[in-house]
Amino acid sequence: MTSRNTLVYGLLATAALITLAPFGLGLVTSFTSPRQFATGSALSWPSPAVLTNYTDLAGAGFGRALAVTAVMTAVITLGQLTCSVLAAYAFARLRFPGRDALFWLYLATLMVPATVTVVPLYLMMAQLGLRNTFWALVLPFVFGSPFAIFLLREHFRTIPDALLNAARLDGANTLDILVHVVVPASRPVLVTLTLITVVSQWNNFMWPLVITSGPKWRVLTVATAGLQSQYNAQWTLVLAATTVAVAPLLLLFVVFQRQVVRSIVVTGLK
């Protein structure tokens, strides 16, 4: 290994350590008793390691917030993938008047900050009688997103026409081509898009905070923020909640990291 490679790997290892250190500190602190955390150093190892922070979370109704967040994320992810695939295929492969103008007009909504839409969305949900309901959490996000449609459209356009024409010669209609040819050929991109959608919705804070009240439809981010005031800033409890919230996302990335890397290679090739 040359000195240059040694320097590069050293910088990467340092950057990884700096990035992962807060997560490691939070994990260690989540097993520290509140008394030890208050009297000792924040960097000290738990002595002994305790599970009281996690049992206290269960008693505080954190399990319901976890379940609500999981169901909300699953519904939004399924809806976004389905609607985005259909819309992206239409914009990429079907011909109809105003197709490109409509696509670029829809894509321009990416420039609108999400905070600008909070008040109109809130008024719409309130007038429909959906405030503080599960449907209010999912309806604004379930019908696709400009980023997802743009990403899938650009990928669908790279699929060879010969492959689609061969399917048509075999008697496949548009829906058959989409389901049996386009979607399997786009699996790495779809996996990456799924991870992006899951992470963004799992960590969504502003909209659930505005549209819900009370513990019934509280999500993880709102429940974790509420712990700081409800339990007088018991940071061991807050960091246990943070660990519970982050763990599923880390597990998803570990399981699907090969698909993410493959999608980068696929989308980088014309």
Image (tube, rainbow, N blue to C red):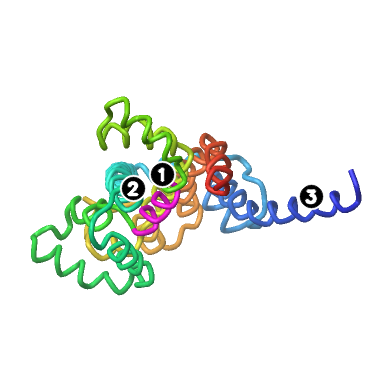
Q: In this figure, which residue is indicated by the disc labeled 3? A: 9
Q: Is residue 8 left or right of residue 257?
A: right
The reply to whether residue 52 is in sight is no
Q: Nearer the viewer, mark 3 or mark 2?
A: 2
The reply to whether residue 45 is in sight is yes
Q: Mark 2 or mark 1, which has the lower sequence index?
A: 2
- Count of number-bearing discs: 3
Find residue 205 and report its image quarter. Answer: bottom left
Secondary structure under tag 2 reads helix
Residue 48 lies, in percent from the top left, at 61, 40
Q: What stretch is highlighted in magenta?
A: 146-156
Q: How far apart are marks 3 and 2 (CA)?
A: 44 Å
Quadrant assignment for the N terminus: top right
Secondary structure under tag 3 reads helix
Secondary structure under tag 1 reads helix
Q: Is residue 194 left or right of residue 213?
A: right
Q: Which mark is residue 76?
A: none
Observer-nearest residue: 108 or 80?
108
Q: Distance between the residues labelled 2 and 1?
A: 22 Å
> The residue under label 3 is which amino acid type?
Tyr
Observer-nearest residue: 234 or 83?
83
Residue furthest out toward the front: 169
Residue 154 lies, in percent from the top left, at 43, 52
> The residue under label 1 is which amino acid type?
Thr
Q: Residue 194 carries which label?
A: 1
Q: Is residue 23 above or below residue 129?
A: above
Q: In this view, does 172 lie to the left or right of 12?
A: left
Find residue 207 and report its image quarter. Answer: bottom left
Q: Mark 3 or mark 2, which has the lower sequence index?
A: 3
Q: Which mark is residue 93?
A: 2
